[in-house]
Image: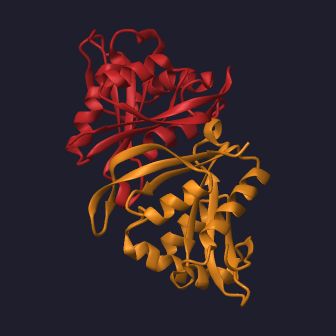
Chain colours: A red, B orange
Amino acid sequence: MGDTLNIRPFAEADWPAVWRIMEPVIRAGDTYPYAIDMTAESAREMWLDIPEATYVAEDANGEIVGTYYLKPNQPTLGAHVVNAGYMVAESARGRGVGAQLCVHSQEEALRLGYRAMQYNLVVKTNEASVHLWQKMGFTIVGTLAGAFRHAEHGYVDAYVMYKELV
Amino acid sequence: MGDTLNIRPFAEADWPAVWRIMEPVIRAGDTYPYAIDMTAESAREMWLDIPEATYVAEDANGEIVGTYYLKPNQPTLGAHVVNAGYMVAESARGRGVGAQLCVHSQEEALRLGYRAMQYNLVVKTNEASVHLWQKMGFTIVGTLAGAFRHAEHGYVDAYVMYKELV
Protein backbone atom coordinates (compact mmCIF):
# COMPACT_ATOMS: atom_id res chain seq x y z
CA MET A 1 0.00 0.00 0.00
CA GLY A 2 2.96 2.35 -0.42
CA ASP A 3 4.40 4.69 2.21
CA THR A 4 3.85 4.33 5.90
CA LEU A 5 1.98 7.45 6.83
CA ASN A 6 1.44 9.17 10.13
CA ILE A 7 -2.20 10.22 10.05
CA ARG A 8 -3.09 12.61 12.86
CA PRO A 9 -5.51 15.44 13.69
CA PHE A 10 -4.99 18.72 11.88
CA ALA A 11 -2.97 21.33 13.79
CA GLU A 12 -2.96 25.04 13.00
CA ALA A 13 0.61 24.97 11.70
CA ASP A 14 -0.53 22.52 9.00
CA TRP A 15 -2.75 25.00 7.18
CA PRO A 16 -0.24 26.25 4.56
CA ALA A 17 0.57 22.66 3.58
CA VAL A 18 -3.11 21.68 3.57
CA TRP A 19 -4.04 24.63 1.38
CA ARG A 20 -1.22 23.73 -1.04
CA ILE A 21 -2.94 20.35 -1.42
CA MET A 22 -6.47 21.73 -1.63
CA GLU A 23 -5.96 24.63 -4.01
CA PRO A 24 -5.12 22.69 -7.20
CA VAL A 25 -7.90 20.17 -6.44
CA ILE A 26 -10.46 22.98 -6.10
CA ARG A 27 -9.15 24.93 -9.11
CA ALA A 28 -9.44 21.84 -11.33
CA GLY A 29 -13.23 21.62 -10.82
CA ASP A 30 -13.34 17.94 -11.66
CA THR A 31 -13.92 16.20 -8.30
CA TYR A 32 -15.45 18.51 -5.66
CA PRO A 33 -18.41 20.84 -6.19
CA TYR A 34 -16.69 23.89 -4.70
CA ALA A 35 -16.33 27.04 -6.79
CA ILE A 36 -13.10 26.78 -8.77
CA ASP A 37 -12.16 30.31 -7.64
CA MET A 38 -12.89 29.56 -3.96
CA THR A 39 -10.79 31.63 -1.58
CA ALA A 40 -8.47 30.12 1.04
CA GLU A 41 -10.81 31.52 3.72
CA SER A 42 -13.85 29.70 2.32
CA ALA A 43 -11.80 26.55 1.90
CA ARG A 44 -10.74 26.71 5.55
CA GLU A 45 -14.34 27.06 6.63
CA MET A 46 -15.44 24.12 4.49
CA TRP A 47 -12.55 21.81 5.39
CA LEU A 48 -11.82 22.82 9.01
CA ASP A 49 -14.61 24.83 10.64
CA ILE A 50 -17.76 22.98 9.53
CA PRO A 51 -16.50 19.38 9.92
CA GLU A 52 -16.39 17.56 13.23
CA ALA A 53 -12.73 16.63 12.68
CA THR A 54 -9.98 17.10 10.10
CA TYR A 55 -6.83 15.02 9.73
CA VAL A 56 -3.53 15.19 7.87
CA ALA A 57 -1.21 12.45 6.66
CA GLU A 58 2.55 12.94 6.97
CA ASP A 59 4.96 10.79 5.02
CA ALA A 60 8.28 9.46 6.36
CA ASN A 61 9.92 12.82 5.58
CA GLY A 62 7.36 14.73 7.64
CA GLU A 63 5.75 16.13 4.50
CA ILE A 64 1.95 16.48 4.52
CA VAL A 65 0.69 14.48 1.55
CA GLY A 66 -3.04 14.19 2.26
CA THR A 67 -5.94 15.40 4.34
CA TYR A 68 -9.52 14.43 5.10
CA TYR A 69 -12.50 15.60 7.12
CA LEU A 70 -15.38 13.87 8.88
CA LYS A 71 -18.79 15.37 9.53
CA PRO A 72 -22.34 14.16 10.10
CA ASN A 73 -24.09 13.85 6.75
CA GLN A 74 -27.48 14.91 8.14
CA PRO A 75 -28.90 16.49 11.31
CA THR A 76 -29.80 14.56 14.44
CA LEU A 77 -31.83 11.59 13.19
CA GLY A 78 -29.39 11.08 10.33
CA ALA A 79 -26.26 12.13 12.23
CA HIS A 80 -25.05 8.55 12.73
CA VAL A 81 -24.03 8.54 9.04
CA VAL A 82 -20.72 10.27 8.47
CA ASN A 83 -19.61 12.14 5.39
CA ALA A 84 -15.92 12.30 4.56
CA GLY A 85 -13.88 14.20 2.00
CA TYR A 86 -10.29 13.40 1.03
CA MET A 87 -7.55 15.21 -0.86
CA VAL A 88 -4.12 13.91 -1.80
CA ALA A 89 -1.17 16.06 -2.89
CA GLU A 90 -0.58 15.91 -6.63
CA SER A 91 3.06 14.98 -5.99
CA ALA A 92 1.98 11.99 -3.86
CA ARG A 93 -0.57 10.37 -6.17
CA GLY A 94 -0.20 6.65 -6.84
CA ARG A 95 1.43 5.91 -3.49
CA GLY A 96 -1.65 4.54 -1.75
CA VAL A 97 -2.27 7.69 0.26
CA GLY A 98 -5.99 7.80 -0.57
CA ALA A 99 -6.47 4.19 0.52
CA GLN A 100 -4.71 4.80 3.82
CA LEU A 101 -6.77 7.94 4.44
CA CYS A 102 -9.96 6.00 3.72
CA VAL A 103 -9.07 3.16 6.11
CA HIS A 104 -8.13 5.66 8.81
CA SER A 105 -11.33 7.63 8.29
CA GLN A 106 -13.47 4.53 8.81
CA GLU A 107 -11.63 3.70 12.04
CA GLU A 108 -12.00 7.25 13.30
CA ALA A 109 -15.67 7.36 12.32
CA LEU A 110 -16.32 4.20 14.32
CA ARG A 111 -14.42 5.60 17.28
CA LEU A 112 -16.58 8.75 17.07
CA GLY A 113 -19.73 6.60 17.15
CA TYR A 114 -20.81 6.67 13.50
CA ARG A 115 -22.53 3.63 11.97
CA ALA A 116 -22.15 4.23 8.23
CA MET A 117 -20.24 6.42 5.78
CA GLN A 118 -21.74 8.20 2.79
CA TYR A 119 -20.19 10.02 -0.15
CA ASN A 120 -22.85 12.24 -1.67
CA LEU A 121 -21.35 13.21 -5.01
CA VAL A 122 -18.62 10.98 -6.42
CA VAL A 123 -18.07 12.25 -9.94
CA LYS A 124 -18.43 9.41 -12.43
CA THR A 125 -15.56 10.63 -14.58
CA ASN A 126 -13.27 10.45 -11.53
CA GLU A 127 -12.79 6.74 -12.17
CA ALA A 128 -9.73 6.34 -9.95
CA SER A 129 -11.72 7.45 -6.92
CA VAL A 130 -14.79 5.39 -7.81
CA HIS A 131 -12.66 2.26 -8.09
CA LEU A 132 -10.73 3.04 -4.91
CA TRP A 133 -13.91 3.50 -2.86
CA GLN A 134 -15.29 0.25 -4.25
CA LYS A 135 -12.07 -1.50 -3.25
CA MET A 136 -12.51 0.03 0.21
CA GLY A 137 -15.94 -1.63 0.51
CA PHE A 138 -18.22 1.16 -0.64
CA THR A 139 -21.18 0.44 -2.88
CA ILE A 140 -22.61 2.68 -5.58
CA VAL A 141 -26.13 2.94 -4.18
CA GLY A 142 -27.37 5.37 -6.80
CA THR A 143 -26.58 7.50 -9.83
CA LEU A 144 -27.50 11.19 -9.97
CA ALA A 145 -27.95 12.09 -13.63
CA GLY A 146 -26.01 15.20 -14.58
CA ALA A 147 -25.58 16.25 -10.95
CA PHE A 148 -22.02 17.55 -11.31
CA ARG A 149 -21.01 20.46 -13.53
CA HIS A 150 -17.52 19.37 -14.50
CA ALA A 151 -15.16 22.22 -15.40
CA GLU A 152 -14.11 20.42 -18.58
CA HIS A 153 -16.92 18.01 -19.50
CA GLY A 154 -20.01 19.97 -18.43
CA TYR A 155 -22.86 18.12 -16.74
CA VAL A 156 -21.76 14.62 -15.78
CA ASP A 157 -23.30 11.93 -13.59
CA ALA A 158 -22.32 11.48 -9.97
CA TYR A 159 -22.69 8.53 -7.62
CA VAL A 160 -23.96 8.24 -4.10
CA MET A 161 -21.65 5.74 -2.39
CA TYR A 162 -22.26 4.15 0.98
CA LYS A 163 -20.75 1.70 3.43
CA GLU A 164 -22.15 0.35 6.67
CA LEU A 165 -19.43 0.40 9.31
CA VAL A 166 -21.12 -1.64 12.04
CA MET B 1 -56.33 16.71 -6.80
CA GLY B 2 -58.45 18.21 -4.00
CA ASP B 3 -58.57 21.87 -2.98
CA THR B 4 -57.49 24.71 -5.14
CA LEU B 5 -54.59 26.20 -3.26
CA ASN B 6 -52.92 29.57 -3.47
CA ILE B 7 -49.24 28.78 -3.24
CA ARG B 8 -47.13 31.90 -2.70
CA PRO B 9 -43.82 33.00 -1.14
CA PHE B 10 -43.63 32.96 2.65
CA ALA B 11 -44.32 36.29 4.36
CA GLU B 12 -43.30 37.14 7.91
CA ALA B 13 -46.89 37.09 9.17
CA ASP B 14 -47.12 33.43 8.13
CA TRP B 15 -44.63 32.19 10.72
CA PRO B 16 -47.06 31.23 13.51
CA ALA B 17 -49.12 29.18 11.07
CA VAL B 18 -46.03 27.62 9.51
CA TRP B 19 -44.64 26.67 12.91
CA ARG B 20 -47.99 25.09 13.85
CA ILE B 21 -47.55 22.85 10.80
CA MET B 22 -43.88 22.14 11.41
CA GLU B 23 -43.87 21.45 15.13
CA PRO B 24 -45.86 18.18 15.14
CA VAL B 25 -43.93 16.92 12.10
CA ILE B 26 -40.62 17.56 13.84
CA ARG B 27 -41.80 16.19 17.21
CA ALA B 28 -42.91 12.93 15.57
CA GLY B 29 -39.37 12.11 14.40
CA ASP B 30 -40.59 9.85 11.63
CA THR B 31 -39.95 11.83 8.43
CA TYR B 32 -37.30 14.54 8.85
CA PRO B 33 -33.91 14.10 10.51
CA TYR B 34 -34.27 17.17 12.75
CA ALA B 35 -34.02 16.79 16.54
CA ILE B 36 -37.48 16.00 17.86
CA ASP B 37 -37.01 18.71 20.53
CA MET B 38 -35.89 21.31 17.98
CA THR B 39 -36.73 24.87 19.01
CA ALA B 40 -38.85 27.22 16.92
CA GLU B 41 -35.73 29.36 16.39
CA SER B 42 -33.75 26.47 14.93
CA ALA B 43 -36.72 25.45 12.81
CA ARG B 44 -36.96 28.97 11.41
CA GLU B 45 -33.29 28.92 10.49
CA MET B 46 -33.61 25.55 8.80
CA TRP B 47 -36.86 26.29 6.94
CA LEU B 48 -36.52 30.03 6.21
CA ASP B 49 -32.98 31.36 6.62
CA ILE B 50 -30.85 28.67 4.97
CA PRO B 51 -33.08 27.92 1.94
CA GLU B 52 -33.13 30.04 -1.18
CA ALA B 53 -36.93 30.36 -1.02
CA THR B 54 -39.82 29.20 1.15
CA TYR B 55 -43.48 29.02 0.15
CA VAL B 56 -46.85 28.52 1.82
CA ALA B 57 -50.11 27.09 0.50
CA GLU B 58 -53.39 28.74 1.49
CA ASP B 59 -56.67 26.94 1.04
CA ALA B 60 -59.91 28.59 -0.09
CA ASN B 61 -60.53 29.83 3.48
CA GLY B 62 -57.16 31.56 3.65
CA GLU B 63 -55.81 28.94 6.03
CA ILE B 64 -52.18 27.90 5.58
CA VAL B 65 -52.19 24.14 5.03
CA GLY B 66 -48.69 23.47 3.73
CA THR B 67 -45.21 24.83 3.22
CA TYR B 68 -42.04 23.98 1.34
CA TYR B 69 -38.52 25.25 0.80
CA LEU B 70 -36.04 25.14 -2.07
CA LYS B 71 -32.28 25.26 -1.75
CA PRO B 72 -29.25 24.13 -3.74
CA ASN B 73 -28.35 20.59 -2.74
CA GLN B 74 -24.62 21.14 -3.13
CA PRO B 75 -22.18 24.06 -3.57
CA THR B 76 -21.35 25.66 -6.87
CA LEU B 77 -20.63 22.75 -9.23
CA GLY B 78 -23.62 20.85 -7.84
CA ALA B 79 -25.84 23.88 -7.24
CA HIS B 80 -27.99 23.23 -10.33
CA VAL B 81 -29.65 20.40 -8.39
CA VAL B 82 -32.30 21.66 -5.99
CA ASN B 83 -33.32 20.12 -2.71
CA ALA B 84 -36.87 20.63 -1.46
CA GLY B 85 -38.66 19.85 1.79
CA TYR B 86 -42.44 19.82 2.26
CA MET B 87 -44.75 19.79 5.24
CA VAL B 88 -48.55 19.53 5.24
CA ALA B 89 -50.83 20.40 8.17
CA GLU B 90 -52.09 17.31 9.94
CA SER B 91 -55.66 18.62 9.53
CA ALA B 92 -55.21 18.90 5.75
CA ARG B 93 -53.77 15.45 4.97
CA GLY B 94 -55.42 13.48 2.17
CA ARG B 95 -56.51 16.55 0.25
CA GLY B 96 -53.76 16.52 -2.35
CA VAL B 97 -51.82 19.33 -0.73
CA GLY B 98 -48.49 17.50 -0.95
CA ALA B 99 -48.95 16.82 -4.65
CA GLN B 100 -49.77 20.45 -5.37
CA LEU B 101 -46.75 21.62 -3.37
CA CYS B 102 -44.55 19.20 -5.31
CA VAL B 103 -45.82 20.37 -8.71
CA HIS B 104 -45.39 24.01 -7.68
CA SER B 105 -41.89 23.37 -6.36
CA GLN B 106 -40.78 21.87 -9.67
CA GLU B 107 -42.14 24.87 -11.59
CA GLU B 108 -40.42 27.29 -9.20
CA ALA B 109 -37.17 25.34 -9.34
CA LEU B 110 -37.18 25.55 -13.14
CA ARG B 111 -37.94 29.26 -12.99
CA LEU B 112 -34.98 29.71 -10.62
CA GLY B 113 -32.71 27.89 -13.09
CA TYR B 114 -32.37 24.47 -11.50
CA ARG B 115 -32.02 21.39 -13.71
CA ALA B 116 -32.92 18.53 -11.34
CA MET B 117 -34.46 17.93 -7.92
CA GLN B 118 -33.08 15.62 -5.25
CA TYR B 119 -34.51 14.31 -1.98
CA ASN B 120 -31.64 13.08 0.13
CA LEU B 121 -33.34 11.10 2.86
CA VAL B 122 -36.87 9.82 2.14
CA VAL B 123 -37.65 7.49 5.02
CA LYS B 124 -38.67 4.08 3.70
CA THR B 125 -41.39 3.64 6.34
CA ASN B 126 -42.96 6.89 5.15
CA GLU B 127 -44.70 5.01 2.36
CA ALA B 128 -47.25 7.69 1.55
CA SER B 129 -44.49 10.13 0.67
CA VAL B 130 -42.43 7.56 -1.25
CA HIS B 131 -45.46 6.73 -3.40
CA LEU B 132 -46.39 10.36 -3.87
CA TRP B 133 -42.90 11.31 -5.07
CA GLN B 134 -42.91 8.35 -7.45
CA LYS B 135 -46.26 9.51 -8.82
CA MET B 136 -44.69 12.95 -9.24
CA GLY B 137 -41.99 11.46 -11.47
CA PHE B 138 -39.21 10.90 -8.96
CA THR B 139 -37.11 7.76 -9.07
CA ILE B 140 -35.59 5.91 -6.15
CA VAL B 141 -31.97 6.11 -7.26
CA GLY B 142 -30.56 4.48 -4.16
CA THR B 143 -31.20 2.99 -0.74
CA LEU B 144 -29.22 4.08 2.32
CA ALA B 145 -29.22 1.17 4.76
CA GLY B 146 -30.23 2.24 8.25
CA ALA B 147 -29.60 5.91 7.49
CA PHE B 148 -32.57 7.25 9.47
CA ARG B 149 -33.00 6.87 13.21
CA HIS B 150 -36.78 6.68 13.41
CA ALA B 151 -38.26 7.79 16.75
CA GLU B 152 -40.40 4.67 16.91
CA HIS B 153 -38.73 2.02 14.73
CA GLY B 154 -35.04 2.77 15.32
CA TYR B 155 -32.63 2.56 12.38
CA VAL B 156 -34.58 2.30 9.13
CA ASP B 157 -33.57 2.61 5.48
CA ALA B 158 -33.93 5.81 3.56
CA TYR B 159 -34.07 6.53 -0.16
CA VAL B 160 -32.31 9.03 -2.33
CA MET B 161 -34.92 10.18 -4.86
CA TYR B 162 -34.20 12.24 -7.96
CA LYS B 163 -35.92 13.83 -10.93
CA GLU B 164 -34.41 15.60 -13.90
CA LEU B 165 -36.43 18.74 -14.60
CA VAL B 166 -34.97 19.72 -17.98
Residue A121 horizontal/vertical position (percent): 51, 35
Q: Is residue A37 visible?
A: yes
Residue A53 x, y percent position in the rendering:
34, 42
Give the x, y percent position of residue B14. 66, 81
Write down the quadrant of residue A100 in the picture: top left
- Expressed as whole percent of the image width and height from the top left, the position of residue B23 reads 47, 79
Left or right of residue B149, residue B159 in this image: right
| Figure check: B143 above or below B132 | above
Name the residue at 25% across, 22% down. A6
State the residue in front, A12 or B159: B159
In this view, which residue lies farthest toward the bottom?
Answer: B61
Choose top left, top right, bottom left or bottom right for residue B124: bottom left
Q: Nearer the viewer, residue B144 or B47?
A: B144
Q: Can residue A88 be spotted in the picture? A: no
Using residue B162 as the reference point, say whether residue A87 is left or right of it. left
Is B89 rendered above or below residue A46?
below
Placement of A116 over or under B8, stated as above or below: above
- Quadrant containing the N terminus of chain B in the rendered view: bottom right
Q: Nearer the viewer, residue A47 or A115?
A: A115
